[in-house]
Amino acid sequence: MPPQITVVGSTGLVGGAALSALLASPSQLSLATLTRLAVSTPAPANPTTTLTPRVLPDLGDAVGAPEKLAAPGGTYLCALGSTRAAAGSLAAQERIDFVLNRDLAARARADGAETIVLVSSGGADSGSYSGYLRIKGQLEDAVCGMGFRRTVILRPGVLLGRWVWRRSRAR
């Protein structure tokens, strides 16, 4: 059975780059994405790789949906995030960057995902005075307590580049 990977946040800068790299892999993979809008993606380099897109206008609906978010034994790659400007306020950003991410990760774990790859931020710290770094640190703390067999936290610095696919506002 090919590795099963669910990517959330695949229309953003980091998630889009991750999905592009997975699609370019010569390995056979079973990929799933969760997005708010339908997006076109390049064809996989390996013709046996499968890509199952799932579109939910409200990503929070995936938390209680009957369909599994992540495959048992699979990997959940979370690159979902927003900015304060796009979200409209720090409180709205926290609902996306912490609450929604935490709830989706918990659902992925409940579905049986064994590995989580979380895109966080350099300087993330739940005790930070910076709202953004505090939110990212709180999410890291929450994810580390969920019982995934493997937890990988990526802490990039400043993100520069263009989004791979056109996306709408993060709200």
Image (cartoon, helix red, strand yellow):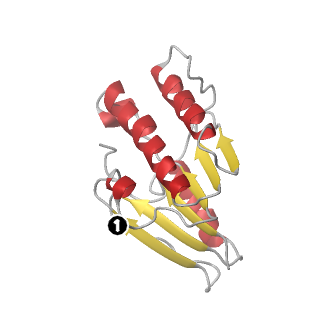
Is residue 94 visible in the rendered structure shown here?
Answer: yes
> Residue 158, image x and y in percent?
58, 34
For the point 28% across and 31% down, the residue is 88
**Residue position marked by numbered label 1 in the rendering:** 38
Q: Which quarter of the picture shows residue 45?
A: bottom right
Locate the C terminus by quadrant: top left
**Residue lying furthest top:** 129
**x and y percent of residue 117 in the render?**
63, 50
* SS class, disc 1: loop
Identify the residue at image location x=53%, y=25%.
133
Q: Please tell me whether residue 61 is drawn above or below residue 82 in the rendered image.
A: below
Q: Where residue 120 sits in the image (x, y, percent)?
A: 58, 38
| Residue toward you, 61 or 84 | 61
Amino acid type for the residue under numbered disc 1: Ala
Q: Assess disc 1: are there few (<14), some (14-19) or many (≥20) residues with their C-alpha within 10 Å of its C-alpha.
A: some
Q: Most extreme residue toward the bottom, as rendered?
A: 47
Q: Specify whether 149 is left or right of 107.
A: right
